[in-house]
Image (tube, grey):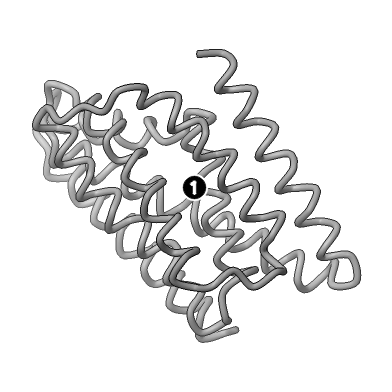
């Protein structure tokens, strides 16, 4: 447990430091505005819920020494698919699918105690990450992709870590009712995804 938390903290800190370096080195105007837009973009409700859910699911459903694989999978696929989105690759009904990915993560949280096969779970994380990445990439600002990507990767990693922290807190302080807590959080996440879908 401690080893897993240590690796997650190191990975998050590294990405945040990369973003900070990008901010420091960016020229006034374009570069700094690109990082700022990247930092803010994942804070939309659909992205925020999905990224918190990834961290929460990973620490709940995966073995303690493998919990880092959920956030790592999401981040790697996110940056790859965002690159495709930035060069103009588009998918029909992308916003609707992003909202439905929140529903998917809600269902995964509800079923997190059912020991979904690791490969299947990470595969679903990767599919959702590809949708979120395409959406990020499609909204690349004029400032350019590199600084924008540093920003959204830093925020995404922080949100994953937030989900991990919630999962660890549930495990530590609500151990007796952890299944109910995950059922409630998963149901809330899925319901939020359906609400966002209906707003499109």
Horizontal relation, residue 144 to residue 51: left or right: left
- Residue drawn at x 34%, y 39% as measured from the top left: 131
> Where in the figure is residue 12, as x and y percent of width and height?
39, 62
Locate residue 135: give its quadrant. Answer: top left
For the residue pair 139 and 134, the one nearer the viewer reads as 134
Name above or below for residue 5 compared with residue 100. Answer: below
Horizontal relation, residue 89 to residue 105: left or right: left
> Where in the figure is residue 161, as x and y percent of width and height?
51, 59
> Where in the figure is residue 182, as x and y percent of width and height?
76, 56
Q: Which residue is mark 1?
A: 51
> Where in the figure is residue 145, as x and y percent of width and height?
14, 36
- Residue drawn at x 14%, y 32% as measured from the top left: 86
In the image as oriented, which residue stretches furthest toward the right? 176
Locate residue 102: give its quadrant. Answer: top right
Horizontal relation, residue 148 to residue 196: left or right: left
Label 1 Cα neighbours within 10 Å, binned few <14 / some 14-19 / many ≥20 = many
Name above or below for residue 119 compared with residue 42. Answer: below
Name above or below for residue 10 compared with residue 15. Answer: below
Q: Is residue 159 visible?
A: yes
Horizontal relation, residue 140 to residue 48: left or right: left
Locate residue 83: give its quadrant. Answer: top left
Q: How many marks?
A: 1
Q: Is residue 33 visible?
A: no
- Quarter containing the N terminus: bottom right
For the residue pair 145 and 108, the one nearer the viewer reads as 108
In the image as oriented, which residue stretches furthest toward the top? 199
């Amino acid at each position: 447990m401690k080893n897993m938390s240590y690796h997650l903290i190191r990975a998050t800190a590294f990405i945040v430091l990369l973003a900070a370096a990008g901010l420091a080195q960016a020229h006034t105007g374009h570069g700094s505005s690109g990082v700022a837009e990247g930092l803010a973009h994942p804070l939309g409700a659909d992205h925020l819920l999905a990224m918190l859910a990834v961290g929460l699911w990973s620490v709940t459903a995966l073995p303690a020494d493998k919990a880092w694989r959920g956030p790592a999978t999401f981040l790697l696929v996110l940056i790859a698919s965002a690159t495709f989105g930035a060069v103009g690759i588009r998918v029909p009904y992308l916003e609707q699918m992003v909202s439905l990915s929140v529903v998917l993560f809600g269902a995964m949280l509800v079923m997190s105690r059912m020991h979904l096969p690791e490969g299947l779970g990470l595969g679903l994380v990767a599919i959702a990450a590809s949708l979120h990445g395409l959406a990020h990439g499609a909204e690349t600002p004029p400032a350019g992709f590199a600084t924008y990507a540093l920003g959204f990767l830093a925020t995404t990693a922080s949100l994953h870590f937030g989900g991990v922290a919630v999962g660890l807190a549930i495990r530590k302080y609500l151990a007796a009712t952890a299944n109910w807590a995950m059922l409630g959080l998963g149901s809330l996440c899925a319901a939020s995804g359906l609400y966002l879908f209906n707003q499109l």
